[in-house]
Structures are given as C-alpha cells and as structure tokens.
Image (tube, rainbow, N blue to C red):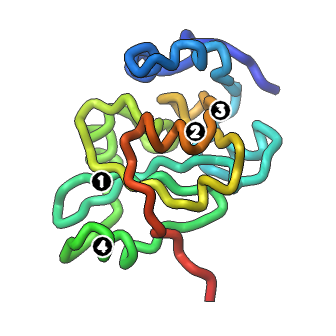
Amino acid sequence: MTITGGSAAAHPRFAEALHTLGLGDLAGRIRRFPEATRTAAEAAAAIGCEPSRICKSLIFAADGVPVLVLMDGASRVDLERVRQELGAAEVTRADAAAVRETTGYAIGGVPPFGHRTATRVLADRSLLAHDVVWAAAGTPHTVFPLAPRDLVAHAAADLVDVRELSS
C-alpha cells in the first residue's frame, strides 16, 4: 500500500532542502509507505520497481572523514575503489551514530542531499542507467523520484565508478 503524502511525509529537514534547492514541486511526489523501506529490496518491492532504480545513500569514513556514496540498489560499494578515488589510506563503513551525526538522519532514511553537515559526495555511474531513480526522503518510510543526473547535480556529487565488480 502506498500513501502519497507530499512534503508533510518527508523529514522536515529534507522538505526544507527541497525548497532551498528549488525542488519544491517534488514534495507532491514523495511517497510514504506504512512499512519501512530501509533496504533497497524493501523500497523496490514497495514502489514496484527493480532494485537498480533505488538510490542508496551510504556514509563511509575516509581516513576518519565522512563521505557520502550514492549507489544503485542492486550493487555494492567497493571500498577499495572508493579509497583509490579519494586518495585515502583507509575507508570504512560509518556506524549508525556517525551516520546520524553527519547527516541528521537514521540509516535507512538518509536522502542524497539536505544533510546536517556538508559532506563530500560520490555518485556511482550505474545510477545513470535509468531515467528515474528513487531515493529516501529523510525517513525509513518515505521515498521520492528524481532523474539521476538531477540527483547527482543537486547532491553536488562527483560521478565515479565505485561499484563492486562481479567476478
């Protein structure tokens, strides 16, 4: 069951970011689900799309500095490729406390922009394979659609190849 809720369905910080970025018209396209859509598989099932159309917003620490990686929901992030891209000595996955401190959102609801702090953003090129992708709207129950190139632009992301390659 889908409930379309508009900006009231989104996290207030995210709704404010939409307006600041000139994306206020997206507020009416935010979908709220009664069940959580914390994982790409849950979000894809709720929306009725393939997992690759979900944009995961994942926080990592590169030499202790937070970095956001935007990745399609069917793929995994290759930490070595992220490390090389950033020229870091070490890249690790951030814990729940670091994610909330950096972004202001809980894991499973982190949107691609509208965060508490400015963070370097990397977007994997795999997102560009679709005309529209779905990303979290600040809560584990809300998502919104956006063209991948617009998402990358509004997130001020560097377009990179950091997807784990299948062997």
Residue 61 vertical position relative to residue 55 in the rendered view, above or below: below
User: x, y (%) of residue 1?
Assistant: 82, 26
- Do residues under tags 3 and 2 come within 8 Å of each other at their CB atoms? no
The crowd level at tag 4 (other Cα within 10 Å; few <14, some 14-19, many 20+) is some
Which residue is depicted at the point 46% across and 69% down?
Answer: 162
Which residue is labeled 3 in the image?
A: 145
Which residue is labeled 2 in the image?
A: 135
Q: Amino acid at mark 4?
A: Arg
Which residue is labeled 1 in the image?
A: 67
- Do residues under tags 1 and 4 come within 8 Å of each other at their CB atoms? no
Q: Amino acid at mark 1?
A: Val
Which residue is depicted at the point 19% across and 56% down?
Answer: 65
- In which quadrant of the rendered view does residue 25 lie? top right
Which residue is labeled 4 in the image?
A: 83
Mark 1–mark 2 Cα distance, whole angstroms, equals 17 Å
Q: Amino acid at mark 3?
A: Pro
Element assignment for label 2: strand
- In which quadrant of the rendered view does residue 122 lie? bottom left
Q: Earlier in the sequence, mark 2 or mark 4?
A: 4
The crowd level at tag 1 (other Cα within 10 Å; few <14, some 14-19, many 20+) is many
**Total marks drawn?**
4
Q: Nearer the viewer, residue 84 or 73?
A: 84
Q: Earlier in the sequence, mark 1 or mark 3?
A: 1
Residue 145 vertical position relative to residue 9 in the rendered view, above or below: below
Drawn side of residue 140 relative to residue 2, left or right = left
Element assignment for label 3: strand
